Image: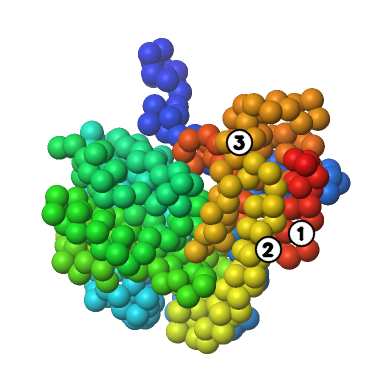
């Protein structure tokens, strides 16, 4: 039998070949490589808290690793104790009344995002995707055979789409709306009224909502991230919530997220997960139980640090001519509009896109930022403020020198 592939078959299947490398991870990797060469890079590219995981969570994981109960397969949908802790958090923070049977524990919020789209989206279905969007969404939509339909909101509307914009983009193929508040990359948070208006519009038109709530605990100035099901409880039968411990508890490496949805959706997604990945590491699940049910002081301390750094970076960037930076109410990103900087020349370089601008900033100022192209249209930069205050000051000072 020939071992050669038929000539007409591409080596890589088209649906996987079409997936682009994660642009955020790429910039982060380049910054880390330059740092390893000894260059004094200040990186605003990271998508994760710089804090250590709280000690009581680490201790719970150490205990769990020693406990033989955790050494073998457990139910693919997750440990019941964890799913109950997730139910409690979802009630108090998301304002949604759900049961443990509606929860699937996933390998990070990312798997929940993939599974939610895989379970809801058929070939040719359109998904309304407010832009700027997190870089993974369009790939997950396309992998499911769906068509991402971008609905753009710029800095003039604080990066928040309106019902009118969504309605203008709706067709008879529209099946799902992706809703992410607080947002990665912009940090924008929809008000309770805006959330309700969007939820009611989705309900009226029978559009599913995938609501990514992974940044819901990271909000500032008394802002509340209103859960879409708290705003419109009747939407429960057509909503999937996505969440995880990564951002709130500085647990990105532990890989624990979850999806919550109506019984039929959860059953189907659970079947998928039972063949795909089975249970998430029991040690990580036990750590997540400790995070959700243990003392919350570390979360408060992290939020306070982020609030201080947010002020530092927004004030610093807005003092640079050409940067328009709305004050984000959540997450740990700022998203300056830099369209005023494009087409101008600094140190002999004339960037015409934010991609070129980000390259120039890395080369000339040794500062890593992620260009807007990773999240939608050109003309923007994403800066994470999940780094030390002194690094933020130094990075902003370098940008100020470059553009003054
Ligand atoms: N949703 C959003 C909006 C995110 O920014 C991220 C992480 N970058 C995730 C989901 C997934 O996080 P994780 O897989 O680490 O839980």
Q: Disc 2 or 3, which lies upstream in sequence?
A: 2
Looking at this view, is 8 or 48 the one in front? 48
Is 3 placed above or below 384 here? above
Q: Residue at x 26, y 50 (%)?
A: 163
Location of mark 1 (residue): 393
Spot the residue most to the right: 38
Q: Secondary structure at mark 2?
A: helix
Which residue is found at the position 60% from the left and 36% from the top? 340
Of the numbered discs 2 and 1, the one sitting upstream in the chain is: 2
* Camera-side mark, 2 or 3: 3
- The Cα atoms of the two marked residues, 2 and 1, are separated by 8 Å
Question: Which residue occupies 72% across, 34% down?
Answer: 360
The residue indicated by pointer 2 is 312
Using the image, tell me which numbered label, if any, was put on residue 19: none
Q: Which one is closest to the eye, mark 1 or mark 3?
A: 3
Q: Are marks 1 and 3 in contact (CB under 8 Å)?
A: no
Percent position of residue 23, x then y: 56, 40
Residue 343, visible in the rendered structure: yes
Q: Quadrant of residue 104?
A: bottom left
Whether residue 107 can be seen here = no
Reply above or below: 252 against 362. Answer: below
Q: Earlier in the sequence, mark 1 or mark 3?
A: 3
Residue topped by disc 3: 340
> Real-space Cα distance between discs 2 and 3?
22 Å
Q: Is residue 190 left or right of residue 252?
A: left
Residue at 52% of width from left, 71% of height from top? 220
Q: Quadrant of the N terminus?
A: top left
């Amino acid at each position: 039998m020939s071992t050669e592939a038929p000539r007409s078959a591409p080596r890589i299947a088209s649906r996987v070949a079409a997936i682009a490398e994660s642009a955020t991870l790429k910039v982060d990797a380049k910054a880390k490589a330059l740092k390893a060469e000894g260059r004094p890079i200040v990186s605003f590219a990271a998508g994760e808290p710089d804090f250590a995981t709280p000690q009581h969570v680490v201790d719970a994981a150490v205990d769990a690793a020693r406990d033989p109960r955790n050494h073998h397969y457990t139910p693919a949908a997750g440990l019941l104790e964890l799913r109950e802790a997730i139910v409690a958090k979802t009630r108090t923070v998301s304002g949604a009344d759900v049961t443990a049977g509606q929860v699937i524990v996933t390998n990070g919020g990312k798997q929940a995002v993939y599974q939610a789209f895989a379970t809801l989206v058929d070939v040719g279905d359109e998904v309304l995707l407010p832009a700027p969007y997190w870089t993974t969404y369009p790939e997950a939509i396309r992998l499911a055979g769906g068509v991402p339909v971008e609905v753009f909101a710029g800095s003039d509307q604080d990066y928040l789409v309106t019902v009118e914009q969504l309605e203008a983009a709706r067709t008879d193929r529209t099946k799902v709306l992706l809703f992410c508040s607080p947002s990665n990359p912009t940090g924008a948070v929809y008000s309770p009224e805006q959330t309700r208006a969007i939820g009611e519009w989705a309900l009226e038109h029978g559009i599913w909502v995938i609501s990514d709530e992974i940044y819901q605990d990271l909000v500032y100035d008394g802002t509340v991230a209103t859960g879409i099901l708290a705003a419109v409880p009747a939407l429960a039968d057509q909503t999937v919530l996505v969440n995880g411990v990564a951002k709130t508890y500085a647990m990105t490496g532990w890989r624990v997220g979850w999806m919550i949805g109506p019984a039929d959706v959860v059953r189907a997604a659970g079947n998928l997960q039972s063949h795909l990945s089975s249970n998430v590491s029991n040690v990580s699940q036990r750590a997540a139980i400790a995070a959700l049910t243990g003392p919350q002081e570390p979360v408060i301390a992290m939020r306070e640090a982020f609030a201080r750094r947010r002020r530092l970076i927004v004030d610093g960037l807005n003092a640079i001519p050409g940067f328009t930076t709305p004050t984000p109410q959540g997450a740990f990103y700022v998203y300056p509009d830099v369209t005023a900087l494009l087409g101008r020349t600094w140190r002999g370089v004339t960037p015409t896109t934010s991609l070129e601008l980000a390259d120039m900033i890395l080369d000339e100022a040794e500062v890593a930022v992620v260009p807007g192209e990773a999240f939608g249209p050109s003309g923007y930069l994403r800066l994470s403020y999940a780094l030390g205050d002194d690094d933020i000051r130094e990075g902003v000072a370098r940008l100020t020198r470059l553009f003054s």
